[in-house]
Amino acid sequence: MKKVSIIVPCYNEEESVPLFYEEVKKVFKERKEQLELICVDDGSSDNSLKVIKSLKDDPCVKYISFSRNFGKEAAMYAGLMQATGNYITIMDVDLQDPPSLLPEMIRLIEEEGYDIVGTRRVTRKGEPPIRSFFARCFYKLINKMSNVEMVDGARDFRLMKRIVVDNILRLSEYNRYSKGLFSFVGFKTKYLEYENIERVAGTTKWSFWKLFKYAIEGIVAFTTIPLILSFVFGILFFIAAIVMFILALTTDYSSLYHIIWIILFSSSIILMMLGVIGEYLSKTYLEVKNRPVYVVRETNIHE
């Protein structure tokens, strides 16, 4: 009998957990596959862990509780590490990832030979327009800079064969950007499209600032183009400096305002480029420390 492992990162989701559990059980009620539900409590400050533990009478429910909030990437990695299914998926507990798609995802893997069946939102209904605009810009930008394709609107919700997950786990880096890692390992992939679904309960934990930082993580993790741009800007400013020197010798170019503007502008570019280089160095610094991606406070796995 095939087993399906569902990894569910949870951070302050006490209202959503029971609703998600009921929906998943409905889907698998009449199915032949064995279910494994791994809930990863990412250091919640509400009663999420208590609610998860209340499901302990169901042997398919397992949980991992972190010692603090390590982030969704760490929660997904912890779940992938512990999943034992033939097929593994990651789902948001707020039901924005509809469990009703799972039967079709399983069919596509078993009958049409796909290794991964992902999901992709074709609309961003319910999102603030500014957030949708920057999301589209991010995907256009990173796809031009990186040789790993990132699908606009793709969710972490994807069903993967065991071999796919085994290869993802070989990528044990500390600074994780899973959407990129999923694309990096390759394999035969199909995307199911659906319209955006709003949260069933609670509020999103992803602020604009958090999403911005996450986008930077993706760019730094999967392209070195910003470093090349730093070098290009250096050459351009060297040429500009030569031109300005010639102008200073041949024309009356002693205006104080012009000089101040040139200093401020060039300094801002230098600082920006130093920031880009510093971002890459900081990621290297964190990697060589070899710290664990997460720390487990308690779990019922291996009991």
Image: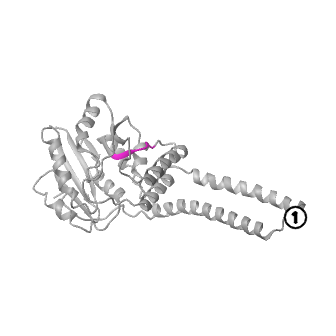
Q: Three-letter amino acid code at disc 1?
A: Asp
Q: Position of residue 113 (x, y in %)?
A: 31, 30
Above or below residue 261? Residue 170 is above
Seen at 24% across and 67% down, the residue is 46
Q: In which quadrant is the N terminus drawn?
A: top left
Q: In front: 96, or 185? A: 96
Q: Is residue 152 magenta?
A: yes
Q: In which quadrant is the C terminus drawn?
A: bottom left
Q: In front: 137, or 303? A: 137
Q: Position of residue 139 (x, y in %)?
A: 48, 46
Which residue sits furthest left? 57
Image quadrant where residue 275 sits: bottom right
Tell me which segment is drawn in magenta.
150-156
What's the coloring here?
one colour
Q: Position of residue 289 (x, y in %)?
A: 44, 65
Secondary structure beneath label 1:
loop
